[in-house]
């Protein structure tokens, strides 16, 4: 997800959330990307997402009773709630171990307006971070974070679907990974409109490892190619 979307993260099964209010006006055709393992399988079925409604570690994961209760990323095969799925990452209680989880949690972060999480998981080489960093360090961070928060208020994100998950090239000790995904979104609260037609997007995101002083080697989002997976 670039600009509006230069980030995002994760996946839900495509059948999980059928568009409920959907007129489909614009359909963006995505190419490539044979369907492989879903994110939940890649994650081991959502196990380890731990936490009950309060997000406590070790508690029983809370399964959403309705589609709307699911975590924005889809909540894995079990359809977990946000509290049992991405919340602990957004709260800083955990950091994703792999690029797919990172993408999934970044997607939820856009949906939930968790700007600081998006900043924290963005690679220093990311063009948006770099551009902004010409001004002043602190300002960059807050402007990207604010961007996410503003986006969250204007755009509703859903139906995340991961269609590619492949190793990329290594660069000078850093590992790279590519994650292709699709999602839908809808602009809401646009002036003069109640809600714009549903849009479908696809993106191929690049993730790269960096050394973090506290966490050791972690994955971060570098950038994404729109319209391809
Ligand atoms: Zn989630």
Image (spheres, grey):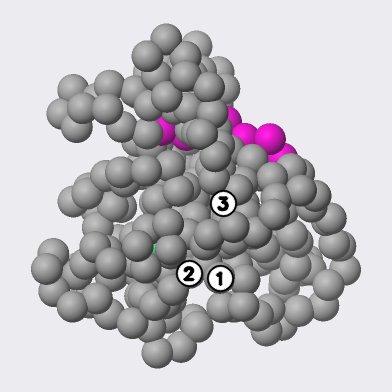
- Residue 35 screen position, x and y as percent: 65, 59
Disc 2 target residue: 74
In the foreground, 190 or 168: 168
Q: Nearer the viewer, residue 204 or 122?
A: 204
The numbered mark at residue 151 is 3
Q: Position of 199 compared to 147: left or right? A: right
Q: Are marks 2 and 1 in contact (CB under 8 Å)?
A: yes
Q: Residue at 44% x, 73% y: name it.
A: 77
Residue at (52% x, 67% y) in the render = 12
Give me the C-alpha separation between circle 2 and circle 3.
19 Å
Residue density around tag 1, few if under 14, some if 14–19, many if 20 or more, within 10 Å: some
Q: x, y (%) of residue 63?
A: 33, 82
Q: Of callouts 2 and 1, which one flags the residue occurring earlier in the amino acid sequence? A: 1
Which of the 4 image quadrants contains residue 71? bottom left
Give the quarter the ligand 1 occupies: bottom left
Query: Magenta stretch: residue 94 in it?
Result: no
In this view, the residue farthest toward the bottom is 65
- Residue 93 in the image, given as x and y percentages of width and height: 18, 51
Picture residue at 37% right of the left edge, 14% below the top: 173
Q: Secondary structure at mark 2?
A: loop
Q: Which mark is residue 13?
A: 1
Q: Quadrant of the C terminus?
A: top right
Range shown magenta: 220-226
From the viewer's perspective, is the residue at label 3 or at label 1 nearer?
1
Ranked by sequence position, the earlier of labels 3 and 1 is: 1
Please say whether residue 169 is visible from this viewpoint: yes
């Amino acid at each position: 997800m670039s600009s509006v979307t230069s980030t995002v993260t994760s996946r839900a099964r495509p059948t999980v959330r059928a568009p409920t209010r959907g007129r489909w006006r614009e359909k963006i055709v995505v190419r490539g990307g044979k369907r492989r393992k879903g994110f939940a399988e890649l994650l081991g079925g959502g196990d380890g997402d731990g936490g009950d409604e309060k997000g406590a570690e070790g508690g029983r994961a809370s399964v959403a009773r309705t589609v709307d209760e699911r975590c924005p990323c889809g909540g894995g095969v079990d359809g977990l709630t946000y509290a049992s799925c991405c919340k602990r990452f957004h709260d800083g209680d955990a950091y994703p171990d792999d690029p797919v989880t990172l993408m999934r949690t970044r997607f939820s972060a856009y949906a939930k307006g968790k700007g600081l999480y998006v900043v924290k998981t963005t690679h220093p080489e990311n063009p948006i971070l770099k551009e902004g960093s010409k001004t002043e360090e602190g300002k960059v961070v807050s402007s990207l974070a604010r961007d996410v928060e503003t986006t969250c208020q204007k755009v509703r994100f859903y139906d995340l679907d991961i269609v590619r998950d492949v190793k990329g090239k290594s660069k000078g000790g850093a590992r790279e990974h590519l994650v292709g995904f699709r999602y839908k979104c809808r602009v809401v609260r646009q002036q003069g409109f109640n809600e714009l037609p549903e849009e479908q997007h696809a993106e191929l995101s690049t993730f790269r490892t960096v050394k973090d002083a506290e966490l050791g080697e972690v994955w971060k989002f570098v950038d994404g190619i729109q319209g391809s997976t």
